[in-house]
Image (cartoon, rainbow, N blue to C red):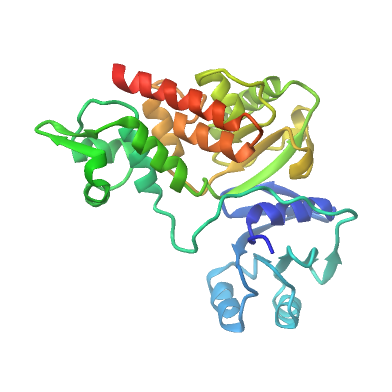
Amino acid sequence: MDRVTADRAIDLLIASGVDVDVQGAFIVDLLLDGRRPVEMKVRQAPATPSQIARDLRQSEGGRLLYVVPRLTPTLRSAAAEWGFAVVAVDDGVVLIGGQEFRPLAAVATTPTLPKSSRRTPWGRFALLRALCRTREPRTQAQLAEEVGITQAAVSQSLSKLGELVARESSGWSAAKVRPLAEKFLAEYPGAGGIGVNWFALDSVNAQAEKVLSAGRAENAILSGDVGADRIAPWRVPTKAIIYADSGLDLAKVGFARTLAERATLELRVPADPTLWSTANAYAGGQRPSTADPLIVAHDVLRTGGSDADEAVEHVVKQLTREWGER
């Protein structure tokens, strides 16, 4: 079976007729006979009684939504007693307020890269992107400020990079940019959080511009094909990926919610908190409209297509040129 993810849960909810508003990387509002805010708890196995008891103590009045592979009798009875919701993605069942909802058609899964169960070191991945921005040496304190992590965390990460980085009297820099870029693309698991798929008839670039404008207050930034088209144009964008720090109701600007297989745009509220710090740095202090080049390249690979590798190569070549000039 595929890995249990928040994205699969969102797809199943929408296919089952339960609309959602994404409020944060782990918070959604269920829109079913009113608005019900819940915290998503993604589990690769059904929650045990002790886990349920702990999560209930930490939540507000059972405002939980468990995303699990299967709906077990334990989960069903606990949900009935405490009033939380369950999305069982492998079973294709949604349980809310004692009601069961099932999709009318098969639910497509959103492609995701393999993900470790360990906590993702967002700061370490952001440091790789920061080192790829410029060849100018920077102190650990400067790197920490740019990335948004502690100087101790920067020091620990630099020590693990070995010959990939160079130390000079004025600070640290990448020995060569391409090996660091390739390391990031090989290891980054994705920004996580919650993604919602949308469909519209406009060109993908026009869709992205519309959402970018609508999402200014939510700090929307472009990524994937549309971001690559701004950095190093190569292929016609097939799907827009946009990050924002909270959800947007794109139905108000002409979009319709859909499943991954039909989507022309993915709006994601990421768990990775470093996306905006590196985007700001690459934008040179201006308000960024595009994620940094390595996030963009990663999302091009995630979107896929026969020429995705070539599109990424063009982005990395442009990154290498600009790294040498800065």
**In the drawing, does residue 313 fall left or right of residue 165?**
right
**In the drawing, does residue 147 fall left or right of residue 75?**
left
Q: Nearer the viewer, residue 183 or 65?
A: 183
Q: Position of residue 191 (x, y in %)?
A: 52, 45
**In the drawing, does residue 202 fall left or right of residue 4?**
right
Q: Position of residue 78 (x, y in %)?
A: 70, 80
**In the drawing, does residue 50 fall left or right of residue 121?**
right
Q: Is residue 259 above or below residue 73?
A: above
The quarter of the image holding the C terminus is top left
Q: Quadrant of residue 64?
A: bottom right
Q: Is residue 262 above or below residue 322?
A: below
Q: Is residue 66 above or below residue 213?
A: below
Q: Nearer the viewer, residue 101 or 21?
A: 101
Residue 326 appears in the figure = no
Q: Nearer the viewer, residue 83 or 322?
A: 322
The quarter of the image holding the N terminus is bottom right
Q: Position of residue 62 (x, y in %)?
A: 65, 70
Give the residue displayed 64% in from the left and 61% down from the top.
4
Give the residue displayed 52% in from the left and 29% down from the top.
312
In this view, the residue farthest toward the right is: 104
Q: Position of residue 18 (x, y in %)?
A: 81, 54
In this view, the residue farthest toward the left is: 169
State the count of labels: 0
Residue 203 appears in the figure = yes
Give the residue displayed 56% in from the left and 17% down from the top.
233
Give the residue displayed 26% in from the left and 26% down from the top.
135
